[in-house]
Image (spheres, rainbow, N blue to C red):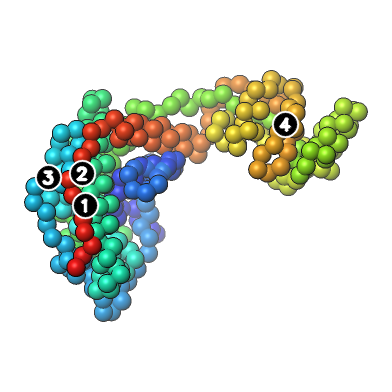
């Protein structure tokens, strides 16, 4: 059985839309900071990639990295120094080296170290933004919740059978007890922010059906035959290009906003029950849409998780945009 445990907590906010597990320790790149959804997830551990027998491991990369004195960056006046940066650098290096079997003896890999360090610094900045934003709203990671998650993760690691001891796990992923605890605290904090900004589970939805055709001429033919009294279901079966529902009268079921392409969504939500649209052009072709029902409904769990991630992504983006961030260093490629 695969075990869930922390591999790396990269605040790559949300994609959100990145749906997540009930507890997140790792945020997807869509969720904070790194190149483009939000947001965070304790991920199932991927099969460990064994490095080649002879290769340059983390120690080679670390030997090429020179600590920087002074302030690396500030976030709303809060200074980030090497002491704040180094733990994130260590666990990120261990994680990427182990996961991808990177040989740091290769010059092309060492050339990427500067960019890699810049990304790590951005992650530390993102963490700082997260904590400051949460503190500004009085949101805290409770000691009880942190302790519960710490114990769950500790037990999951030891029960996985992949490590002979907790110390081996920490060493393999470049973690100290203190920094692992900080990752857990950040994870709990993310959960609390998500809860605080979660939207209502109810949203306006429509129950609609459609007939999709390739061109206007075919669409006009369908409209003419509907006006002549032919049944929608029969015409959907004959003409619709949407094979997933053409034999079910083109029924799309209930859906909320943000699910369909924009033009289709706007047309569907503008209709009242019983009304039929004009031909609506999208990248798929031309749609004839008929709304059957409309109202406030509770969204399904998958959709709601996406909505929560979207709300968290929006919140974090606003915090980042409002923050006064000054980066004092740009890391150079390793020599």
Q: Which label's residue is closer to the chain start, 4 or 1? A: 4
Q: Does the residue at mark 2 contact the one at mark 1 (Cβ under 8 Å)?
A: yes
* In front of the other: 110 or 134: 110
| Residue occupied by mark 4 | 289
Q: Secondary structure at mark 4?
A: strand
Query: How far apart in space, not on screen, are marks 4 and 1 (Cα)?
Result: 54 Å
Looking at the picture, does residue 68 appear above or below residue 287?
below
Residue at 32% x, 44% y: name it: 33
Q: Mark 2, residues whose alpha carbon is within 10 Å: few (<14), some, or many (≥20)?
A: some
Which residue is disc 3 drawn over? 71
Q: Which circle's residue, 3 or 2, is located before the other in the chain?
A: 3
**Which secondary structure, mark 2?**
strand
Q: Is residue 118 left or right of residue 4?
A: left
Dot 3: few (<14), some (14–19), or many (≥20) neighbours within 10 Å? some
Is 95 in front, or is 124?
Answer: 124
Is residue 141 in sight in this rendering?
Answer: no
Disc 1 target residue = 330
Q: Which label's residue is closer to the chain start, 2 or 4?
A: 4
What is the secondary structure assignment of the residue under circle 3? strand
Q: Are marks 4 and 1 in contact (CB under 8 Å)?
A: no
Q: Picture quarter containing residue 294?
A: top right
Callout in the foreground (4, 1): 1
């Amino acid at each position: 059985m695969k075990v869930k445990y922390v591999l790396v907590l990269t605040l790559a906010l949300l994609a959100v839309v990145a749906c997540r597990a009930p507890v997140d320790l790792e945020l997807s790149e869509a969720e904070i900071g790194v190149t483009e959804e939000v947001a965070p997830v304790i991920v199932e551990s991927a099969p460990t990639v064994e490095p080649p027998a002879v290769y340059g491991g983390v120690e080679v990369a670390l030997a090429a990295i020179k600590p920087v004195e002074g302030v690396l960056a500030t976030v709303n006046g809060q200074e980030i120094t090497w002491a704040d940066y180094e733990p994130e650098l260590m666990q990120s290096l261990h994680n990427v080296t182990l996961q991808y079997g990177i040989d740091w003896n290769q010059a092309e890999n060492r050339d990427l170290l500067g960019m890699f360090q810049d990304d790590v610094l951005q992650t530390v900045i993102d963490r700082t933004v997260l904590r400051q934003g949460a503190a500004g709203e009085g949101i805290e990671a409770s000691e009880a919740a942190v302790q519960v998650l710490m114990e769950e993760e500790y037990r999951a690691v030891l029960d996985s059978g992949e490590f002979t001891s907790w110390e081996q796990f920490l060493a393999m992923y470049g973690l100290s007890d203190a920094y692992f605890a900080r990752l857990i605290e950040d994870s709990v904090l993310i959960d609390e922010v998500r809860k605080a900004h979660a939207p209502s589970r109810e949203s306006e939805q429509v129950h609609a059906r459609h007939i999709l055709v390739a061109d206007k001429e075919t669409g006009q033919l369908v409209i003419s035959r509907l006006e002549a009294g032919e049944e929608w279901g029969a015409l959907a079966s004959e003409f619709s290009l949407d094979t997933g529902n053409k034999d079910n009268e083109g029924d799309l079921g209930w859906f909320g906003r943000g699910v369909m392409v924009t033009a289709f969504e706007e047309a569907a939500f503008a209709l009242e029950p019983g009304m039929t649209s004009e031909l609506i052009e999208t990248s798929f072709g031309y749609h004839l849409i008929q709304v059957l029902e409309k109202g406030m409904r509770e969204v399904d769990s998958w959709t709601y998780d996406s909505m929560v991630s979207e709300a968290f992504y929006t919140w974090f983006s606003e915090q980042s945009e409002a923050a006064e961030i000054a980066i004092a260093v740009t890391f150079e490629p390793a020599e």
